[in-house]
Structure formats: structure tokens, C-alpha cells
Amino acid sequence: MSDIRRLLIANRGEIAARIARTARAMGIATIAVYSDPDRDALHVRSCDEAIAIGGAAPRDSYLRVELLLEAAALSGADAVHPGYGFLAEDANFARAVVDAGLTWVGPPADVIAAMGDKLAAKRLVADAGVPIPPSAELDGDPLAAGRTVGYPLLVKAAAGGGGKGMRLVATEDELAAAIDAARREAAAAFGDDRVFFEHFVTQPRHVEVQILGDSHGSLVHLGERECSIQRRHQKVLEESPSSAVDADLRERLTGAALAAGRAIGYVNAGTVEFVLGADGEFAFLEVNTRLQVEHAVTELVTGLDLVRLQLLVARGEPLPFGQEDVRFDGHAIEVRLYAEDPARGHLPSPGRVHCFEPGGADIRWDAGLGRTDEITPHYDPMIAKAIAHRPTRGEAAVALAAALDATVFHGPATNRALLAAVLRDAAFLAGETTTDFLERHFSDEVVATLGPDDGAVDAAAVVATVHASSERLASRALLPDVPAGWRSNPGDAQRTSWRFEDEVIDVDRPPPPRDVHAFSPVSRAERAHIVVRGRTVAVEVFAATEDAVDVALDGRRRTYRVSRAGAEAHIATPGAAVTLTEVDRFPAPEGEQAQGATRAPMPGSVVTVDVEVGASVSRGDLLAIVEAMKMEHRITAPYDGVVADVRVVAGEQVDTDDVLVVIEPSS
């Protein structure tokens, strides 16, 4: 038995902060590691010490085993917890940790290696009687392997999970491009570009079983989770228990999971994943030899702390309970709040967060950033997880949706409105949650309607105008009693203009008063009528501070949270965050614009440039691939034409709206 006194957390984000909280409660000192962009990150602030490992991209920082081992030696750590993602399922890292005389918080390296080879894992569990789907290694002719497995099929990373390095292929013509993309993505995420094929079950459910074993021969399951609601094979919503699993199916699923665990000699926390068909039949997918993002729902329905149990097992202690002691209470639902823009094809949305205040009573938030932090383009776009635990599934969904509505998030675009809409969707509440749920119920056209409505935008424009007046008033040190916008001579109504998406919204205020001792009606507690987009709104301001405005609009009073960053104003309206940009009345001349330019949709790195100057292209042809937040994004030709200019090269870093390729349209 080995004691753990100083724990190095070889990860970042919410999981590193989560591990730090539990370890500290156990009297264990924690050491964070951080890359250059993460120097002020929440997980760094959550630990007792922090060691810089440099770099920015994962391959230059969190994926470098030698840097992590150096950090462990420098800090005097006696154990390493890998979290999830990055090197959590890297057998070589686990061996290196043990070889350095440190305790590895996870399953043995040999188990990780056995399950890391997904095809070998399938053969191993099949021998234990666990059903498996058709699959094939990619060691020869990919077309022949594809025909053997059958279409549709998935190209999957052999060394990882989490939706990275995975592509759905419907026909043989799509296979080559899918293999190349999956390999690149797998290499970037896991440092290993091996892939294999697996038959894809139409309209399946993704159901998994949490297992936990110790080094004394005890192995238990902690029930099932359903993780079917996914986008690009990345989980968006998870829950426990599954609405599709009855007592008989649960017994079969958990029995298969335990059989798989025993077959491989599993120790510590892990997850056995299955695909579940509409007929109630299931097949083994893989074993995740680590803690998972969705472990929180299991913790809430069982009342167990999985990180604490991981640490106890790593110290060599037996599990403090048996299978008969595990109790399940109520229903838990988790959603993942991502920095991405659903209205723009779910593109990642990095940038500065000006205010993040999670909402909801008795809602568990596992966050990867603080109230004001930076979301960088180098890592996964998940901001936080919100988890509701209630007696019933319906109550949990209602509570979680309300918590999302009450959350204040000012900064990059998020999927918050989409998550709340899913939780309130009739099909979701009815339990119709197959893996194509989002495609069937939340098409691009539906998602486009989830943004703030005209009423919310109008309210935000009025509030932003009130806030701007208050800010300007506060800045007048020489004449502190003179209202913002006051003039000694009467004049016309004052206009402030705001840009929302592609629209300019004009807000007209009454003319300023003649009397120097009178106050502007929108910066003091007086009534006024303001015209926004031609509609008159009765406004009564009660208070305006740096980050909030207490105001009644047409008799409905509420406090709006406001963040100002340069020309941008972020306003939290009920259920939606509205970002407005103040229109400069005296704008500088615009710089030369490239006609026919295709631009970077987000900051990232150019992976490939697929055209040359003079090449003819058709609408939809691939021009370049940009990688951001561990995902690849294809930049395609907007119309038929000829490549007039190529302004980037592979490996170059680009910012949002940087010109990549210029297309001269066909006549």
C-alpha cells in the first residue's frame, strides 16, 4: 500500500480543478501543470502549486511525457492523476509514471494497452461472451475492409475517444477523405494516427456502464448512463439512468460490463460502452480506461465520489463497499456548455469571457474557467458541465433548463440556448434520444430560431444605451452633476446606434434638458420614452452600475447584467445573451477588402492548403483545412471560379476573418 501526499494532475480545465477539490479534502497537496495560454487558468488557481510546461498546442505541452515527468520530479509529487483526454489512456505514459517510482491513478498500463487497441479489445471481450459489432483493421486495402464491415461505417481512432478522430462514412466514395481527416485529428488529439472501421447502427443509442475495481479482486458496476445526444460524435447531454433501459436490460448490460472488466483484470474507474439498437439488442464498443466527462451523473445518483474512490484504489485500499451496497436515487442529467456558435455550423468560438455566473439552485457546475477568463483556440471548447439531480427525469430537465436560462455568460458564442431547447423538447422528454437526435430535431433552420427574439434585442439595445450613458456620466470628473449628453442649448433627440449581427438598431432618446441641475432621464431614476427600431418604449431607470442596470421597460422591471468591452456591450436578457456593438459615428475608412475572399471562421492553424493560384474550382470544392479546438474545419469554395490568390501556407496560425484564399468568380 502506498500513501499519496502530493498529487500531480497531468491535465487541464474542469477535470483538473475537480480533482484538486477532492484531493484537497483528502489532505493531499495538488500540483497543476500549465501551458503558455493556461498560465492564469482556473485549474492553476485551484491547485497548491503549478509547474509551467510551455508550449500552446497539446503536442507541445500536455502531450509531452518528458515534461510531465520533469514537473513531477520538480514538485516532489508521489502520484499522477491523468484526468481524461490527452494522455489519460496512454499506456506508455502510465508505464513511465510507474517506472519513475510514482503512483499511477488509473488502471494498470497493460490493461490500458489492451483496451487501447480497440480491435484487440473486441476480440478479448468477445471471448468473455460480450456481443461485438462488425469491425475491421486498416492494415491493407481500405476499400476491401469497408466492404467487409458494410456501409454506413465509422472510421475511428484506435487510441482515443471523445469523438476525436471519428468520421461517419455513408458510401465508398467518401472513404479516403474520411480516413485522412480521422488520422490527422487522432494524431493531434492523442499522438497516434491509427484508425479502424466499425459498422454503424442506424438510429442507435449510446449506453455505457461505469465500473470500479480494486487490486483485491473486487469489481462493481455503478449503473448505466445514456450519452446518445451527440454532435459530430461528441457527447452533448448525458443522463443516468437511461430511459430506454428496463430492469431486465439493465441486468444484461451491467452483467456484460462486469464480464468485460473481469476478462481484462480491470482496476480503478472505467467505462464499458455499448451501442443499443431499437430492438433492445446491444453490442460492445470499447472500454474507456479513465474517468469520463459524464462521471458526475453517476456520482449524483449513487452519492459516491469517483475521484476519491480512484485515489483510495490507487493507494492500494479495498473498495469500501460491495455491489449489494450500491444504491441508486433519482435521475441526473448533465449538459456540456461549449464555446461554439450553433448558428454558424457549431464553429468553435474562442475569446475573452467578460462575465460567467452559473445559475440555478442545487445545480452542480463543474467549470473549466472562472468569472473572467480566456477561451483559447488550442483546446477542447467545453466551458463547463451543468448537472441537475432530481427525483424524476422530467424534474431534472426542467431544473437544468431553468439554470441555463439564469446563467450569465458574456463573451464568445455558446450552445446554451440549444441545450435549454433540447431539455424542453417534447421528443427528449418522451425519451426518444437516439444518436441522430440533434439532426432530426434541431436542424440548422431550427437552431437559427433559438437566438434572442426582437423583444430581447430591443430590450438589450435600450439597456446598453442606459449603461453607456451611466458610464459616460461617471467619467465626467470635472462636472460630476451634469448628465451624460447634456447640452446648454435644447436640441433634437439623441441617437445611439448598435449593430446586432447584420442589423443596425437605432435608439433615440429625448433631447437633453435645459436646466443644468436636471438629470438625463436614462441615467437617473426618472421616466422617459425611448424609441428603438421605431417602437416607443416606456423606460424608468432605478439604478445603473458598472455591471448592471435596474430598469423597468414598459412597466416590467428587472436587473440586467451588463459587460462592456470596447465597443461591445454584452447584456443578459431572460434566456439569452445579446451582444451589441456600438456604431462609431465617425468611422475610419475601411481598409482594402479582398473580393471573393474566403476567410478563417475562427483562430486556428492551417492544416492543409488544397489549391494553387490559377486552379479552377467548383462550388463546394475543398480549398483549405483549419484546425481549432482539436477539430478540423473544411474551407470550401463559395461558388465556381478561379483561384486568384492564396494567402496562407500549411502550419500558419490565423485569426478570425483572416483571408485564406481569394476566388475570382466565373462570368
Image (cartoon, rainbow, N blue to C red):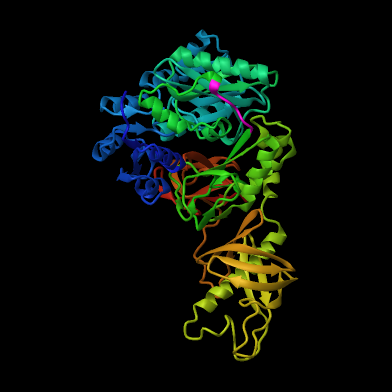
Give the residues in magenta: 325-330
The percent coordinates of residue 580 (x first, y second) are 59, 63
Q: Above or below — where is 277 with respect to 18?
A: above
Is residue 329 inside the magenta stretch? yes
> Which is nearer the eye, 435 or 321?
321
Q: Quadrant of residue 21?
A: top left
Q: On the picture, is 337 further left or further right than 451? A: left
Image: 404 above or below 491: above
Residue 133: in sight, yes or no?
no
Position of residue 606 relative to residue 305, above or below, is below
Q: Position of residue 247 (x, y in %)?
A: 67, 19
Count of numbered circles in the view: 0
In depth, the one of 228 and 647 nearer the eye is 228
Instruction: Please identify the quadrant where the N terminus is shown.
Output: top left
Whether residue 315 is visible here, answered yes or no, is yes
Instruction: Write the residue at 52% across / 27% down.
Output: 176
What's the magenta bit mostly, secondary-structure-wise? loop
The residue located at (66%, 69%) in the rendering is 551
Image location (x, y in percent) of residue 27: 36, 38
57 magenta-colored: no
Q: Quadrant of residue 235?
A: top right
In the drawing, does residue 206 fall left or right of residue 477? right
Q: Where in the figure is residue 52, as x and y percent of width and height?
A: 30, 45
